[in-house]
Image (tube, helix red, strand yellow):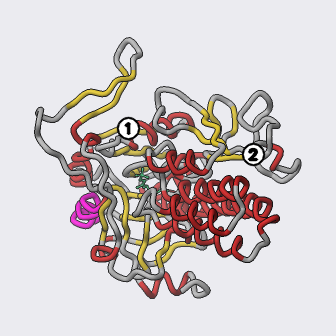
Amino acid sequence: MRVDGVWYRSVWVDQANFQPGDGLPRSTEPGPMEPGDGWSVHILDQTRLPWAVEILRLTEVGQIAHAIRSMQVRGAPLIGAVAAYGMALAVRADASTEAMERDAALLAATRPTAINLRWAIGRMLTRLRNTEAAERARVAYAEAALIADEDVAQCEAIGRHGAALIEAAAAQAPDRAVNVLTHCNAGWLATVDWGTALAPIYRAHDQGIDVHVWVDETRPRNQGAALTAWELGAHGVKHTVVADNAGGHLMQHGKVDLAIVGTDRVTRTGDVANKIGTYLKALAAHDNGVPFWVALPSSTIDWMVGDGVAEIPIEERDATEVTDVTGRTADGVITTVRVAAAGSPAANPAFDVTPARLVTGLITERGRCAASEAGLAGMFPDHA
Ligand code: MRU
C-alpha cells in the first residue's frame, strides 16, 4: 500500500532480508525499506493514525507483545504476522527451548479472540522445535517472512474473488456507484497488505468500477472512522463515515448493495467472530435482503471449534475505551476526553459472533463458499 508515494507493508524487517527482484513492493529511498540491520521489526503505530504516520522499530519480544496488546498493531492476520516476527526476535535473543516456549506463551496471551495469533505462533513453534538452537534465529526469520508473504498473496486473491461480487452489483446498477458497507478495519492495516474486506473494494476501484463505501465508525475504538476512512482516502476510494447505528436505516432505504466485513475467527461451521457490532449489521442485512459477505484468509479458520457463540473467547477490554474518546482538536492537539457520565461503569466486549445462517458467504483465497461445514470442508478438504 502506498502512503504519500511510498510503498509500505504494515510490518517489515529491514531490506537486508529482502532480495532484489523478489517482486515485493518497496520504496525508492528514503523510505521504510531502506537498507538496515536486517533483523529489527518495523510497524506503523496504528494508535497514532490517522493523525500521524509513525514507524516503530521493535527489537525485543516484549515490545512486540506490548504492540499487540496496546493495539499499535491490530487486525487478525497482522497480529499473526507480527507475532511470528516476535518469535524471531525471541529466539535471536535466546534460542533455548525454555525461553522459546516462555516467549511463545507471552505472545499468545496478548489477545484472545483472533485465531491467527495462535495459528502463527503454533506454526513457528512446530518449525522451531524441530530445529537445532544454533539455527533457530535464521529459520525463524525465514518462516516469519513466509507467513507475511503468504498473507499478502492470500489477501490479493481474496481481492480478486470478492471484486467479482462488486462487478456483478455494478452490472445491476450501471448508472450509479455500488454501495458497500463495512465494519471496523479489515484493510491493509489489518493484514500485511491489501486487507480482507477492503481488498475486493481496492481491486474493483482499480478496475474502474464506481464504488462507494459506507464506513461504520466502529465504536469504541473507532477503527472505521480512524483507519478504514484513512486507508480508503489514501487509495482514492469514495467513502462516507457513518455512526454505527446508521446501517439498518441505510439498508431499509436501498442504500447498501452489499456488506463485506473481515473476521477474527471463523468456526468450521461458518460462525463468524468479528468486531463488536458486526452481528447487528448482519441482522439488519438479513431483514433487508442485503448480501452479507465475510472475507478471510484460511489462517482465520478455527477447525477445532463448532459453535462460535458458545466456544469463541471474547476479549473484554478496558472500560475507558467506552467512557473516553480520543481525537484531534482544531488546533492540532491530540487529546482524550470523557464522554460518559462521571462515575458510571462501562463494559467493553470487543467482539461478537454472527451465526453462519446470517452470512451470505465467505470470500477466501481459494474462492467463495457457503458459510457452513460443507462449504468450508469443500473449499479446504486438505485442512478439514
Ligand atoms: O480489535 P481489532 O481492531 O484487532 O479488530 C479487528 C477486526 O475485528 C477486523 O475486522 C478483523 O481482525 C479482520 S482483519 C482483516
Q: Is residue 271 above or below residue 213?
A: below
Place of residue 306 in the rendered image (x, y in percent of width and height, measured from the top left): 37, 83
Can you tell which mark lies on residue 225? 1
Report the front residue among 134 and 358.
134
Q: Which residue type carries mark 2?
A: Pro
Secondary structure character of the magenta stretch overall: helix
What residue is pinned by disc 2?
A: 25
Highlighted magenta segment, given as a residue range: 279-289
Query: Cβ of disc 2 within 8 Å of ligand 1?
Result: no
Place of residue 109 in the rendered image (x, y in percent of width and height, measured from the top left): 45, 61
At numbered mark 2, what does the secondary structure look like: helix, strand or loop?
Answer: loop
Which residue sits at x=48%, y=35%? 230
Ligand 1 is located in which of the four quadrants? bottom left
Which residue sits at x=83%, y=45%? 16
Which residue sits at x=51%, y=45%? 67
Q: Which residue type carries mark 1?
A: Ala
